[in-house]
């Protein structure tokens, strides 16, 4: 039985999202662990845990296209790292999201 998620004590503003990153180590087909340093140019992956309200353009609110629970692929250098309640999260702009998986 899965444990229920507790309410996140951080709320992103504007077009920002909070992402819980997936494991940074990968395992090759033969079982060899590939550390993060070997795959520096690959984009990051994670799960969206909170979204802002959107951003204003020309006086009207543009809603967010990603939602909580989406698995996303995002730019490796387009985020800020934060630690909330002992868990590491990444805060990034929705424009840094490359794709929803």
Image (spheres, helix red, strand yellow):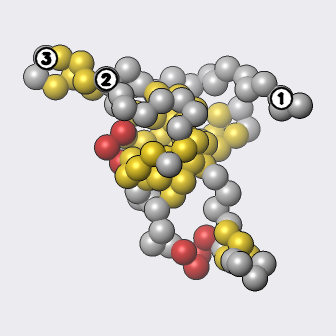
Question: Would you place residue 67 above or below residue 87 in this image?
Answer: above
Element marked by disc 2: loop
In this image, 98 relative to 35: left or right? left
Mark sitting earlier along the chain (1/2): 1
- Observer-side mark, 3 or 2, equals 2
Residue for badge 1: 3
Q: Residue 63 bears which disc, if any?
A: 2
Element marked by disc 3: loop
Q: Residue 70 bears which disc, if any?
A: none
Q: Residue 59 bears which disc, if any?
A: 3
State the residue in front, 41 or 85: 41
Residue 32 quadrant: bottom right
- The percent coordinates of residue 40 (x first, y second) are 50, 73
Residue sitting at the far top: 60
Q: How far apart are marks 3 and 2 (CA)?
A: 13 Å
Element marked by disc 1: loop
In this image, 82 relative to 94: left or right? right
């Amino acid at each position: 039985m899965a444990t229920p998620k507790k309410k996140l004590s951080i709320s992103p503003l504007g077009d920002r999202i909070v992402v819980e990153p997936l494991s940074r180590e990968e395992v090759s087909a033969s079982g060899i662990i590939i550390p993060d340093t070997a795959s520096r140019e690959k984009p990051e992956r994670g799960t969206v845990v909170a979204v802002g309200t959107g951003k204003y353009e020309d006086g009207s609110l543009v809603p967010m296209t990603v939602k909580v629970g989406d698995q996303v692929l995002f730019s490796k250098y387009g985020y800020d790292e934060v630690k909330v309640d002992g868990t590491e999260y990444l805060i990034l702009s929705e424009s840094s999201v490359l794709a929803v998986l």
